[in-house]
Image (cartoon, helix red, strand yellow):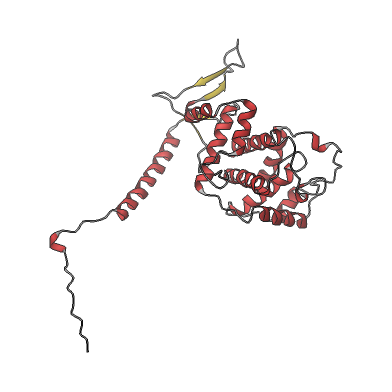
Amino acid sequence: MEYNPSDHPRASTIFLSKSQTDVGVPSKRVREKRKSLYINHFTHISENKHNPGLVRRKYSSCSTIFLDDSTVSQPNLKYTIKCVALAIYYHIKNREVDGRMVIDIFDEKLHPLTKSEIPPDYEKHDPEQKQIYRFVRTLFSAAQLTAECAIVTLVYLERLLTYAEIDICPVNWKRIVLGAILLASKVWDDQAVWNVDYCQILKDITVEDMNELERQFLELLQFNINVPSSVYAKYYFDLRSMAEANNLSFPLEPLNREKAQKLEAISRLCDDVYKDLRKKAKKRSVSADNLSVVRWCPAIIS
């Protein structure tokens, strides 16, 4: 039985498998890269006059620890958007050769996002990763969305492709991504963005079009907007694995006193919470002195 990756934590994400077929990275190697991701730091050495573009790998030591500011609960916004854009790029590039049907609501020729004329061979040219990144970044920057929302956007996108049995291609990728962002921003973020707000970002789109896009997106998802924490974490770590395989490393910085104190405070808070939970869950034994014997009262039948 095959599980849906957007619903079950054990199923491998679609974007990771598509990226591996493209770059030829075995899954075992990706897992090894994931384990050592936190100790690898790539930086250009500008001090080296002979090799100004030399790339050097730095490792954590007893005196210096390299950490990035991205965690599963608070990912780095810029690099998360870059990773999501790369995942969408691999979805488009390595889609089914024969091609599946394109649902009308996602067809940009039928529902254009701009008033500019769409080229007749628009569906034959795959978008570059930078183009996808600029589109997603513009929406996230204007709507002030979080990095967590970007990960949920990717979950909804893969859920749509699986449930509706469609492929994302040059003619529908913008509207599919827009619908996923629209839904993720309402479900995940505390301060939801209204559909009219997106109309102010994309000047040529109407509120009616946004409402219809949201409605059909929800119907194709069968109104399943739940994202378990285990699925969210799987997508986060698979994004990091894909980023490492494509030399898109998260920026690492030396651990300073401020970060160390913050990590210590978080650790103490979690430790206190777990201690309270253990105390509540612990079964207390009763001594013989405190035992109370239940006496049976004879029933009186009148």
Where residue 274 appears, as percent x and y from the top left, is: 35, 48
- Please give the name of the residue rendered at 71% of the width and 46% of the height, measured from the top-left corner: 176
- Please give the name of the residue rendered at 18% of the width and 78% of the height, measured from the top-left corner: 297
- Left or right of residue 243: residue 198: right
- Left or right of residue 210: residue 145: left
Decide: is 49 above or below 118: above
Where residue 270 appears, as percent x and y from the top left, is: 39, 46
Decide: is 193 above or below 61: below
Decide: is 19 above or below 11: above
Give the position of the N terminus as an image quadrant.
top right
Nearer the observer, 159 or 185? 159
- Please give the name of the residue rendered at 76% of the width and 56% of the height, measured from the top-left corner: 207
Instruction: Farthest residue to the front: give it.
Output: 1
Nearer the observer, 68 or 244? 244
Decide: is 224 above or below 127: below
Q: Quadrant of residue 295?
A: bottom left
Q: How many marks?
A: 0
Where residue 262 appears, as percent x and y from the top left, is: 43, 40
Instruction: Farthest residue to the left: give it.
Output: 289
